[in-house]
Image: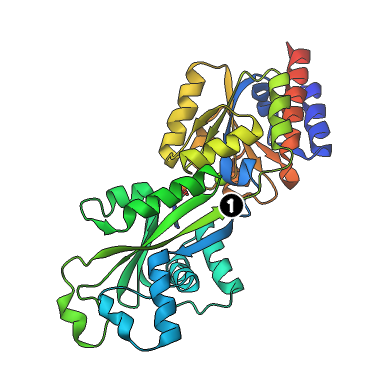
Amino acid sequence: STPAAVLSAIAAGGRQGVLFKGGEHIETAGNVDAVAFDKTGTLTEGNTRLTDAIARPDLAVSARTDRSAGTGADRETGTEVPMNDDDLLALAAAVQSRSEHHLAAATVDAAVDRGLEIPDASGFEAVVGKGVHADVDGDTIHIGNVRYFETVTADRSIDGLDRGIDRLRSLETDGKTSVLVVREASGEQGTGSGDGAGSGSDDGDLRLLGWLAFTDTIRENAAETIARLREAGVETVVMLTGDNERVARHIADEVGIDEVHAELLPEEKVDHVEALQDRHEAVAMVGDGVNDAPALATADISVGMGGAGTDVALETADIVLMSDDLGKLPYAFSLSRETRKTLY
Ligand code: ADP
Ligand code: MG
């Protein structure tokens, strides 16, 4: 039967907002010497917001001229697509209204906040860890990171891509998760006037329309939590994230993590947990369950965020931090360690 010391540790944890889902987890948690953190929703609050929706400046200029002059003369520039920042955001929101991703929700929220009319989208598809596309007004709109455009549209040239990638890199260095928006015109340049239905079998032209950037708030006690974990004897602290390398580094620097593995697919997070297990006694993974459920299941101890966390994390986690308080993590491990000492 469960030792009295374990029962009283479970009760003590409960009073502090740390829910142990069983006595055996106290024993394992007392041995943790490596902790892997998910980024989004774990080290950050997960309240992703759109900070920038920027139409390619040359397209925006043409749109403004077009609208103020109203002469139609600018149309001689051929395939230029008039586009301002709000047009770009409305198009992106059309595609993202079909997605469940946190970047998608932030895009739609921003469009709604600006009072934009969001067009209909159809044929939505997501490419895990890379981006999404859907058909809007007869064209295909692609939204994704650099890897998306290296793979999904890899063998085809995209007008303006290099410039977009430059912008992305600098936004990411500032810690903003960023994606490009690219329009794939359906066959002819027009926006689908009646008889175009049969002519669009060939791939259309690809053109950068602009870019979007997002930010998320780092939890205020994240840095302190990581420092206290180290004091409590945790040898190795790493970040495992699907997000971009530069964004991940920026956040890792702020919270004091030096080992960062970025741009990971959910299965690759598992590989990293297993690699940590090879060289440590017990590995804990802390996550919110979005994209990290397999890694949580692989770790010796999984820690879920109780407040904003998903049901997945709550159901499968060995330890739940109620009310999302990351600061309780060092306490959970030292309580476990102390309890373990009384058992052996
Ligand atoms: P994370 O939860 O860390 O963002 P994901 O694997 O969900 O990890 O996403 C990794 C990256 O894939 C994102 O940072 C983004 O670049 C791209 N991505 C995923 N989903 C979308 C989406 N709906 N729209 C645009 N980009 C996306
Ligand atoms: Mg997450």
Judged from this view, the residue extending furthest toward the top is: 344
Relative height, residue 35 to residue 73 (above, below): above
The image position of residue 96, as x and y in percent, is 46, 65
Q: Residue at x 44, y 51 (%)?
A: 167
Tell me what residue is drawn at x 20 percent, y 73 percent.
187
Would you say 129 lies left or right of 247 here? left
Q: Residues within 10 Å of mark 1 (few under 14, many from 20)?
A: many
Q: Position of residue 251 (x, y in %)?
A: 59, 39
Which quadrant holds the C terminus? top right
Q: Is residue 328 left or right of residue 109?
A: right
Using the image, determine if residue 265 lies above or below residue 30.
below
In the rendered image, residue 42, in percent from the top left (x then y), is placed at 62, 42
Judge whether residue 124 can be spotted in this image.
no
Viewer-nearest residue: 278 or 94:
94
Task: Tell me the quarter of the picture where residue 342 sits.
Answer: top right
Instruction: Give left or right: position of 116 versus 16.
Output: left
Name the quadrant containing residue 138: bottom left
How many marks overall?
A: 1
